[in-house]
Image: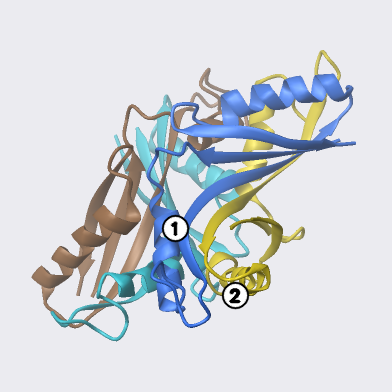
Chain colours: A yellow, B blue, C cyan, D brown
Amino acid sequence: MKAIVTVTLKPDVLDPQGRAIQRACASLGHGATGAGDGIAVTDVRQGKRFEIELAGGDRAAAERLVRELCDKLLANPVIEDWTIERIES
Amino acid sequence: MKAIVTVTLKPDVLDPQGRAIQRACASLGHGATGAGDGIAVTDVRQGKRFEIELAGGDRAAAERLVRELCDKLLANPVIEDWTIERIES
Amino acid sequence: MKAIVTVTLKPDVLDPQGRAIQRACASLGHGATGAGDGIAVTDVRQGKRFEIELAGGDRAAAERLVRELCDKLLANPVIEDWTIERIES
Amino acid sequence: MKAIVTVTLKPDVLDPQGRAIQRACASLGHGATGAGDGIAVTDVRQGKRFEIELAGGDRAAAERLVRELCDKLLANPVIEDWTIERIES
């Protein structure tokens, strides 16, 4: 099985790397103030994504284990949210 | 509109951070050699995930812009792959 | 000139990636409980490091600019500390 | 003891996150083309920094262990360089 997990900063936590990318878009002509073709990047948030390969056990055991990994190894629950996007068999 | 982009190391590029997480699973009793409940973490790959907020323009312009951002700001095409997971309106 | 900046999580902010590396050390025989050769990894903290190349201006202008970058683009002051390690001419 | 390790992309490996920060500087008035006060950010490279707390053993054992961690857990030797900045006792 393979589990896909995403970890994102909570919405109220400032993300300087995302902000740098948003500002960099201005240098490509797509800053928050718009551009010639009328489309602008108004915000960027950077998160993490984990692909976790699992062997043995059933789907319920996989989900239990992935939840444990999220809590203990992948995310800081004070500043980050985690989501199990999917578990593929 | 909001675009979700994932950036992952190419499959043949070693990922030390993913490997550290896989090894750390052993300390939780779920290393590659299995454990009491028969489920093991055999591999972990860490990638990046970007949420990009867009204003103005249509869906085609959004996709063009996001592709440009992936090529120029979000990924190193020599060692990373990028995917536009979805564009939400 | 070249400025070296480090950004670290504040001491009271949990660092899951550092913790994963610390736990991974156990799988190499160097966990917190020690090992055959009597040395153990008891904690790991992961931070960021930036090398910033600057052109024009004098050292005072460089330091002013690097401070501005730290505040606006490189660090989240709520959860991170930044340090200008050195400015090389 | 505490070891400080830095991991940087090799000079010939493109660093999109560093480039985004360099481009973002333009939006602060300090792009590669200079600015009013005559100082410009011409390049940014982003790396990692690890603080590793060690217990037991002597300095030589610490250095051996930190080298092993760099090779096995902290860096991808194909695309990254690592440096032990210092070992504090």
User: Residue reaching furthest top?
Assistant: A36
Q: Residue at x 55, y 72 (%)?
A: C13
Could you tell whether C34 is left or right of C47 in the image? left
**Subunit of mark 2?**
A
Q: Which residue is mark 2?
A: A68
Image coordinates of residue C10 in percent, x first then y, are: 51, 69
Of the two numbered discs 1 and 2 in the rendering, the one whose residue sits closer to the viewer: 2
Quadrant where the image shows the N terminus of chain C: top left
Q: Residue at x 22, y 55 (%)?
A: D84
Q: Locate residue A79: give its quadrant.
A: bottom right
How many numbered dots are placed on residues in this image?
Answer: 2
Could you tell whether C88 is left or right of C48 in the image? left
Q: Residue at x 33, y 45 (%)?
A: D76
Please, is residue B13 above or below residue A5 in the view? above
Q: Locate residue C28: give its quadrant.
A: bottom left
Whether marks 1 and 2 lie on the same chain: no
Q: Nearer the viewer, residue C89 or B77?
A: B77
**Subunit of mark 1?**
C
The answer to whether any part of residue C83 appears in the image is no
Image coordinates of residue B66 in percent, x first then y, are: 71, 27
- Amino acid bearing label 2: Glu
Q: Nearer the viewer, residue C39 or B13?
A: B13
Q: CA distance from mark 1 to mark 2?
A: 24 Å
Quadrant where the image shows the C terminus of chain C: top left
Which numbered marker is on residue D58? none
Image coordinates of residue D33 in percent, x first then y, are: 53, 17
Which numbered marker is on residue C47? 1
Q: Locate residue C46: give its quadrant.
A: bottom left
- Amino acid bearing label 1: Gly
